[in-house]
Image (spheres, rainbow, N blue to C red):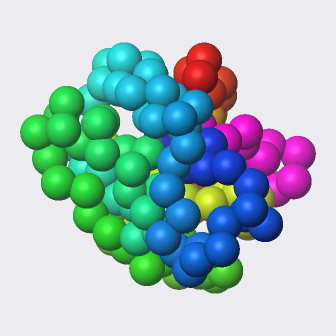
């Protein structure tokens, strides 16, 4: 499961380190809404970019599943496609949720399948990697 972080306001309105930009009110509601949408998929690991907005997006899901959020540098803004594919390979056999940023989503899925903030897409594994599966729109926020 690939998740784009929920709403975190406008980057240009945040004056601090962008890694520390939190979810806004809408984003917190979206994060809560993701729980009901994603729990039925049998997720057993929750990995996230260490950016605060990503971690906050999946904290409610991880809590509902009784697992920790695993902060992974492979999911940060500007990471390479190879780094993310390496992470997917390392997670083989698990049913992970990966929370990341728009640029990483585009690297993996291409510009036609970019996710809205708070949306998710199932990644169906194949022998050679993965194919994009079902789209889950962002919960109302």
* Residue occupying the far left of the picture: 66
Residue under the image location 72 percent in, 42 percent down: 115
Q: Quadrant of residue 117?
A: top right
Q: Is residue 103 above or below residue 30?
A: below
Up-down relation of residue 66 to residue 12 (above or below): above
* In this picture, residue 21 sits left or right of residue 117: left
Total marks placed: 0
Q: Residue at x 55, y 43 (%)?
A: 24
Q: Position of residue 19 (x, y in %)?
A: 52, 74
Q: Which residue is pictured at 87% across the width and 53% down the height?
A: 111
Main SS category, magenta section: loop
Answer whether residue 76 is visible to the viewer in this image: yes
Q: Position of residue 136 (x, y in %)?
A: 60, 25
The answer to whether residue 123 is seen in the rendering is no
| 112 in magenta | yes
Residue 93 to residue 133: above or below: below
Residue 63 in the magenta stretch? The answer is no
Q: Which residues are magenta?
A: 109-118
The image quarter containing residue 33 is top left
The answer to whether 59 appears left or right of 135 in the picture is left
Query: Residue 110 placed where, x, y %?
Result: 81, 56
Residue closer to the observer: 9 or 70: 9
Query: Which residue is at the far right?
Result: 112
Closer to us: 121 or 118:
118
Residue 137: percent from the left, percent from the top? 65, 24
């Amino acid at each position: 499961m690939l998740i784009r972080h929920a709403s975190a306001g406008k980057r240009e309105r945040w004056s601090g380190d962008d890694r520390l930009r939190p979810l806004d009110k809408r984003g917190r509601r979206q994060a809560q809404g993701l729980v009901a949408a994603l729990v039925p998929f049998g997720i057993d690991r929750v990995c996230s970019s260490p950016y605060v907005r990503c971690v906050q997006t999946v904290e409610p899901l991880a809590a509902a599943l009784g697992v920790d959020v695993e902060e992974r540098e492979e999911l940060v803004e500007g990471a390479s496609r190879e780094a993310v594919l390496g992470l997917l390979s390392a997670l083989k056999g698990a049913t992970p949720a990966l929370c990341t940023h728009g640029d990483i989503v585009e690297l993996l899925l291409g510009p036609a399948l970019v996710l809205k903030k708070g949306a998710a897409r199932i990644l169906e594994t194949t022998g050679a990697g993965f194919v994009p599966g079902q789209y889950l729109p962002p919960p109302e926020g």
